[in-house]
Image (tube, coloured by chain):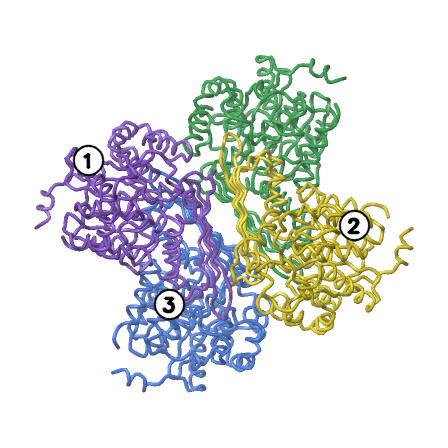
Chain colours: A purple, B blue, C green, D yellow
């Protein structure tokens, strides 16, 4: 099938956001619609820079948004809160997209909160908790299909941007397709919601991206399914701030044969993510993927700790302070410190749009299973061991430069 | 000629340091001799880490040191001062190499200070300033040969680690071999000392490394000569601290399509380098090569300034504070800051040894002219446009992985 | 005269701002009117906190603003620019005071730019440069009186918030009243504009505050005049950011007998102040008063440098990085670093209002001459040697607690 | 009794250190003996700076050291470890005092570890745990007296510098002298060791200083006893680093009426203190006293958290990173950050010597009970509510300036 055939196969791309009223989803939608309205530019989007921008990707203006959430506050309200607390988006941008937000909000369905952790489940409406797991999946699948049919969508990408769940205990029972489907059939109440969303997507042939540290498509059962069904998927835990910097800096210490004695990372943030991560169970997954980057690049690191604390006044902004104590020639001890201060959602949102466009492209060209060319977007890229940001980018650039 | 022939060609490697009693030279010698004595390890040396360590490089223990300087204080005194002011080297290490330093100091000849700038030339003894330029070159060349013969050296590497000179005015007159040799013949008094050392080395067939921002082998005339005579050489301005970090971090901003609005770099240091660089003429070259890295990686950068200030109490330690103001998605302005605190000499010294070993290797295998695989060592790698540290390292790794 | 008599003496307080369309003046007016409109609170105002708030001070709501400027852009435009570039004030606040700003803008007269330095005088309209100095003063004085009469003002406070001028050469010729008046009579073209404004104010009996590093009332001639005429005045160079922190921190090092070896201060800012201060002549005064604080508190400091650089993207925001290298017990060298990131105008504006209220109070109670209780507001408080912020505050608190 | 009588009363001052082989004790002894040997100066000592240095204090050279510890490693070994790991003291200083350390080590008795917490009591030798509390106290008291008699000491100051204990549960039972003595008589096994040391000291008439966050003399029962017996004592938790900075900086925010929204403090350190404080029970007291400083100076602070983490590679060095998010005029949000990097012991040791000298002075002049003039030395000064460092220093300066 040549490029024009692919194009003929249809280009109306839908974006189904699990956690559609959260900060990241809200900002992604605001951004996409503001770009469509000519009210902002595409700074921060990897797919808008060479060589990736040469790929024939679905246009941002044409993306059709929908999603699940358990939070009843509307997208408009969420965006207003963001504007008010963080000045992102600003008032002019918000005004330009307010009607779009209201329309998209009507397409957001009530989600499930199975095993989302105590920090999350105090919130209100959700898919009936007493339904069998299999029935929850069916309802999710129905929501996908209804949206797809209703909006004439040719290709639906499902992206998990919901708050981080606790890690499941004994996840190895989901490590192959049989085990996973048995768990579903036996109504295993410990299956995390993110796995259900991923299963429903991939089993229906929809490309899936896990933007969060939650389990989702990382379990072997989902990976098997995606490989068998040849559905593209990728994850885990988008790399937006401190870990991004680590993945750029740590290779420098390795490359110069400098011995990192200690690398302390202290993150403070004030959004719901911070609040959820204060709950130790929910933080475990995130801390693991943040820590792994250094352990992988600097296998002889002496000490490696990451902390995440909730600092309400920061709202959606987050500050990381990293302290790196290292030894060089003649046992000389030296230090590097950095602080990184950014808007969590403004860093994350363009990557959501990038990932949607790139995984839709993979789907169009029949590339199923894991998508290693997307490794640079993730703290814990499934199936990719190299955490060096530059090398991860090279995977993407090589992909972009392939002749299609 | 196969590998064993090369080996037969002899392996006694001499290291001629221009500025042999300066901080960097002193620390390089102390380090090499401490390694030979088993008193320290090779942390900080790129050639002691895979894949580069697989190359058949001259052993550190066998390097024979000599050099030029205009500073009459002995190497032992210099090392004692370093130990006393900076705790690098420590007293135990110093004690272990003191006799070696004394012996090496006897091999240091008086150098020339032609056009080294006002900040340097207040120092005392030097090659007679009234000699014709051609005669100065001859004296330098004689010093190389005497050392070589006296110590039975098979391959002599010349490394410029002297204090930074002012940039010459109208350097384009030295831009080809004819122009350069005409300037020498016409006794052009504006030829900088570093060019004379480079000329004498390369014209005699000795590999040459310019570790400093001075002109040396960067002029076209020297490059022509090295190409014609097939002598390996490389430079300019070793990348040890702030610029190293920039070359690792700036690609991250580029890769994520984040718009750097301003990048302010403020360096404070207390050694002679700092004092010399307070003299604006001497600083110009260094500031240019530090600034170029960002301009090259981030061509759309809004504002890019580097300052170097002299802070006596820091002695050989230097601290850089960098402030990066950048814009992301939805015109969100964010910041990153870092401080880097290191011992200038301890960061530089292992790279001197690395460069000696690698350029000796190139010479052994007949690789003449510029050595782009050494780009990662330099702020302004001659003939290499890519300032991304990761990609520069890949040049070295590819070289190391070649089958020889 | 008892308190009620004073009150009877009239309470309509006018504020004449020299540099009335600059950032600081604009923000002061915006803030005062926003407080009057109930749109913001008084956070950041010293006079709104005990014990100072117990004094019977003129209410913020009642202040009547006017001023001089040479910049033709209206106050409304200036405030819009501030809102747009810095998000201070925000759009809601701006909307609430826009009409007030327009009305106040009508009361701003064209000022003089005599000896304001090259960086400033490229701007357009101003009092005719060819007028004799005495005539310039008369015109300024007329502007004060016209405003006063027109608005029924009982007490007019003049505050210099114009851009920093270069230091005059040989200021000692203005060191007593005779010298100063002779210079005026002899049409001394080197008299800085700030001195003319100060002279016109004090000679007319109007309290005067110099919020900037410019000369103004610091010369002996003006001080004599104010003492003789019993007009309260104070200055010099409001302490809003880095120097404020220094005056709080340096006493800690002194109090613990820690030896500061080096204190490096690096300021980057993006407003007109930054641009003006890049001009070395204009920066001299500011750097001197910033440096003096440390020299005074830490007389044995080893090294003390302050830099101010212009970083356009920061707009009205400024960041200071200070690096403090100190020695403690057993010759142990240690470091402290801080960064301070603030909106220059938002830090300065409440102090303008505080100073107006406090100097009006002094005037009401007949306290003429210098006002040492206001020392805590200034980097170089005229007539006060103590730079310890805590002790300076005690002067204010003691004043506030006096029984009147 | 006049000053000369006091002098006649004898001046041989003994210093009994509880935790005599710990880092702080070791460094205090090394420092005192190095000063006595003329090998270092008194930088870092408050009592060596005007106006305090004018008091007639016991000379450092004459202090006679002894103490308790449960750690069997000798003082010489401890000092060597410090020198080796931290470069404080340096080798020259260590060599000069090595014999003194060995002699002092012979005077160190085995201590008690009752209720020192799990993190501490894994260490070896100690006073027999099965002894009745009253008998433990008697043995401590005997150790004090034996030392005193053996060395002809006129005045013995006891200083607790042992590792931090857990807070006792229900400390209110010790809140008056009767309750405390009943607990002793009833062999209350929950009485912390620090209280026993304090009781033994004060009941024997020896001035007592609690340099640590442990309970010791903070309970009402000890305070009653000291008041009744007129024995001077003071504490709690020496203010050496981050909290010192807080107590200097926080008043600045208060004084300018800036609203601190969040103050995050993150401490990393690598010595035994850090390890002990990783045990949450032991950390509670320290975190409380560190946090209280801000709550006291900034009663309206929005968020205030302190973390202490153990980073082994830092050895005795500690780094604090503080992030201060504050609001100023027109609701403008701004930030200040600082890092403080110091040698824990080198910051603490001079204060031990200062406190010994000052409390001996109080004792000589018959000033019993709490000593508020010493508040500036402590994070939680018993009986003093003012945490403003400048005001605390004024208490000391006023004391020093009193005519005696």
Quadrant location of the C terminus of chain C?
A: top right
- What is the x, y in percent for residue C183? 66, 30
Q: Residues within 10 Å of mark 1 (few under 14, many from 20)?
A: many
**Considering the numbered disc 1 on the image, is that residue within a helix, a strand or a loop?**
helix
The residue where tag 2 is placed is D226
The residue where tag 3 is placed is B217
**Which mark is in front, 1 or 3?**
1
Are the residues flagged by discs 1 and 2 in contact, CB closer than 8 Å? no
Chain designation of label 1: A
Q: Residues within 10 Å of mark 3 (few under 14, many from 20)?
A: many
Are the residues flagged by discs 1 and 3 in contact, CB closer than 8 Å? no
User: Residue at position x 63%, y 72% from top?
Assistant: D77
B71 vs B53, nearest the viewer: B53
D204 vs B3, nearest the viewer: D204
- What is the x, y in percent for residue A174? 26, 54
Is A235 placed left or right of D319 in the picture? left
Is D35 placed left or right of A277 in the picture? right
Q: Residues within 10 Å of mark 2 (few under 14, many from 20)?
A: many
- What is the x, y in percent for residue B66? 47, 78
The residue where tag 1 is placed is A147
**Which mark is in front, 1 or 2?**
2
Question: Is disc 2 on the same chain as disc 1?
Answer: no
**Considering the numbered disc 2 on the image, is that residue within a helix, a strand or a loop?**
helix
């Amino acid at each position: 099938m040549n490029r024009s055939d692919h194009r003929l196969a249809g280009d109306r791309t839908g974006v189904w956001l699990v956690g559609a009223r959260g900060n990241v989803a809200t900002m992604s939608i605001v951004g996409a619609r503001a770009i469509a309205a000519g009210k902002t530019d595409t700074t921060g989007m990897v797919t808008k820079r060479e060589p990736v921008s040469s790929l024939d990707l679905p246009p941002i203006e044409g993306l059709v948004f929908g999603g699940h959430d358990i939070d009843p506050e509307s997208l408009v309200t969420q965006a207003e809160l963001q504007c008010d607390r963080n000045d992102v988006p600003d008032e002019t941008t918000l005004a330009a997209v307010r009607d779009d937000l209201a329309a998209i909000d009507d397409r957001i369905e009530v989600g499930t909160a199975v095993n989302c952790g105590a920090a999350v489940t105090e919130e209100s409406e959700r898919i009936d908790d007493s339904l069998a797991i299999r029935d929850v999946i069916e309802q999710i699948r129905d929501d996908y299909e209804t949206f797809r049919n209703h909006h004439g969508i040719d290709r639906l990408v499902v992206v998990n941007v919901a708050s981080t769940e606790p890690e499941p205990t004994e996840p190895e029972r989901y490590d192959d397709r049989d085990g996973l489907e048995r768990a579903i059939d036996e109504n295993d109440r410990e299956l995390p919601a993110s796995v259900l969303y991923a299963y429903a997507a991939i089993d229906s042939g929809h490309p899936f991206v896990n933007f969060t540290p939650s389990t989702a498509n990382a379990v072997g059962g989902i990976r098997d399914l995606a490989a068998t069904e040849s559905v593209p998927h990728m994850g885990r835990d988008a790399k937006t701030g401190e870990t991004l910097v680590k993945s750029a800096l740590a290779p420098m210490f390795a490359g110069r044969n400098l011995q990192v004695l200690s690398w302390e990372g202290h993150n403070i943030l004030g959004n719901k993510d911070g609040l959820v991560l204060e709950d130790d169970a929910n933080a475990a997954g995130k801390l693991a993927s943040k820590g792994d980057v250094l352990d992988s690049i600097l296998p002889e690191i002496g000490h490696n700790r990451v902390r995440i604390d909730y600092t309400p006044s920061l709202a959606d902004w987050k500050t990381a302070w990293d302290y790196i104590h290292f030894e060089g020639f003649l046992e000389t001890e030296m230090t590097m410190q950095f602080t990184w201060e950014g808007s969590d959602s403004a860093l994350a949102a363009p990557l959501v749009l990038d990932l949607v466009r790139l995984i839709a492209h993979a789907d169009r060209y029949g590339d199923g299973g894991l998508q290693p060319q997307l490794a640079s977007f993730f703290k814990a890229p499934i199936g990719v061991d190299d955490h060096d940001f530059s090398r991860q980018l090279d995977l993407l650039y090589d992909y972009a430069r392939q002749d299609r």
